Image: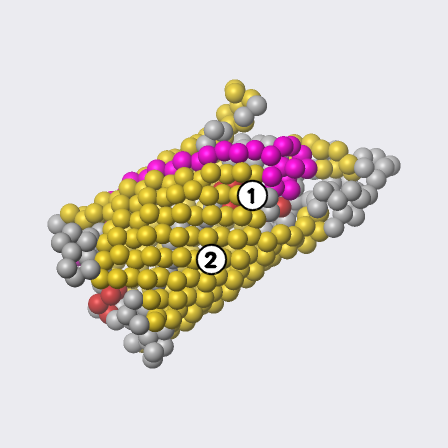
Amino acid sequence: MVVINRLKVIVGIVFCCAFISTGIFAAILPEDRADALYHYYDGGGVDIQGPSILVRKSIKDKVSISANYYIDNVSSASIDVVTTASAYTERRIEKSVGLDYLHDKTIMSFNYTKSDENDFSARSAHFSVSQDFFGDLTTLNIGYSQGWDEVGKRDEPDFSEDADRRHFRVGLSQILTGNSLVNISWETITDQGKVLNNPYRSVRYREANTEQYSYQSEIYPDTRTSDAFAIRGMYYLPYRAALKLELKQFSDTWGIEANTSEIGYVHPYGDDWIFDFKVRHYSQTNADFYSDLFDRLDAQNFLARDKELSTFSSLTIGIGASYKKELKDWDYIDSYSINLSLDRIQFDYEDFRDLRVVAPAGTEPLYSYDANVIRFYLSVYY
């Protein structure tokens, strides 16, 4: 359901070997390719895995069309589930189609995505424009997305609420020198709907004059606006390797402020291999209406105990490898690549407590857990 959205595995590995040349940043269509991916997430009692298939083909060097089929098989016995409900399994199926159109130094991109679960349905449309300037040293990207969600509940067939989401984004990439590139981006997202939270989730409140607690349903505001600003840099080293740096700041109208910093290193080996390593740190403050334990029933207008709205931090260490081979003697396939990436993520919560431990209300130990993310895919270029 909605709770799984924050745990979706990001598909793909970024490759950036020998990227600094003015011709590379000229407007070009994506390569013709077919990808077969397997993704796996395991952490905090949640297991997500499944395949994804992507096919892309260009037409007369002006148009590129794509189609993607993606599956999440979810098995959840997370701390939220085991303390207030029972473990469950579900399947999310996502389908998308896209089109890129190239005209001179401009690329216009369209995409439509449909995602369905047994109690959640999402539709989204995306449009973006990319334009090169100043001898292809500068690239401007502008995009807009519109999403339509329908939220249901397994045990209530008549329950149905809609949510609308709008996403505006703009980015500017600039080649500074023959060895360095910088990108700055800004995006804002607006959400509106009666159910912007997981309808199964509850908050807990202290029972009067006792060390016990009881539960009531969460209540969220029906609007949310968030803004994010990021700066990314890449520096090409003399021996064909590259350094990557990203800094990102996020804030929203619910009172959350977050900061992300990531440093990465990409190293080629021979003509066919690329290895990469990254370290990422994330931290955020809690939402204004979040509390691990409220003082009483109906303590305020809005109530939340979602750990993703609490104060927490995470540390990610990731490694990846890619092998790409040219096939000069083949008629229909130009090359193929095999890609594997592994991430280890540690989550530490500062004001969300582990209710699996029996203790007086508000004295339970703080919650933390580790997660593993695996992505393996085969790409064929034609």
Pick whichever, 300 or 246, lies toward us.
246
Q: Residue farthest to the front? A: 329
C-alpha separation, residue under disc 1 versus residue under disc 2: 17 Å
Pick whichever, 124 or 155, lies toward us.
155
Hey, which quadrant is residue 17 in on the image?
Answer: bottom left
- Residue at the (27%, 48%) spot, across then down: 34
Q: Which span of residues is magenta-colored? A: 77-106
Residue 95 sits above or below residue 11 on the image: above
Name the residue that disc number 2 marks: 342
Q: Can residue 366 be seen in this view?
A: yes
Q: Residue farthest to the right? A: 209
**Numbered disc 2: secondary structure:** strand
Q: Is residue 103 magenta?
A: yes
Pick whichever, 251 or 294, lies toward us.
294
Q: Which of marks 1 and 2 is nearer the N terminus?
A: 1
Q: What residue type is labelled 2?
A: Leu
- Residue 21 place in picture, x, y as percent: 25, 71
Crowdedness near tag 2: few (<14), some (14–19) or many (≥20) residues, C-alpha within 10 Å: some
Q: Is residue 222 visible?
A: no
Q: What residue type is labelled 1?
A: Val
Residue 221 sits above or below residue 349 on the image: above
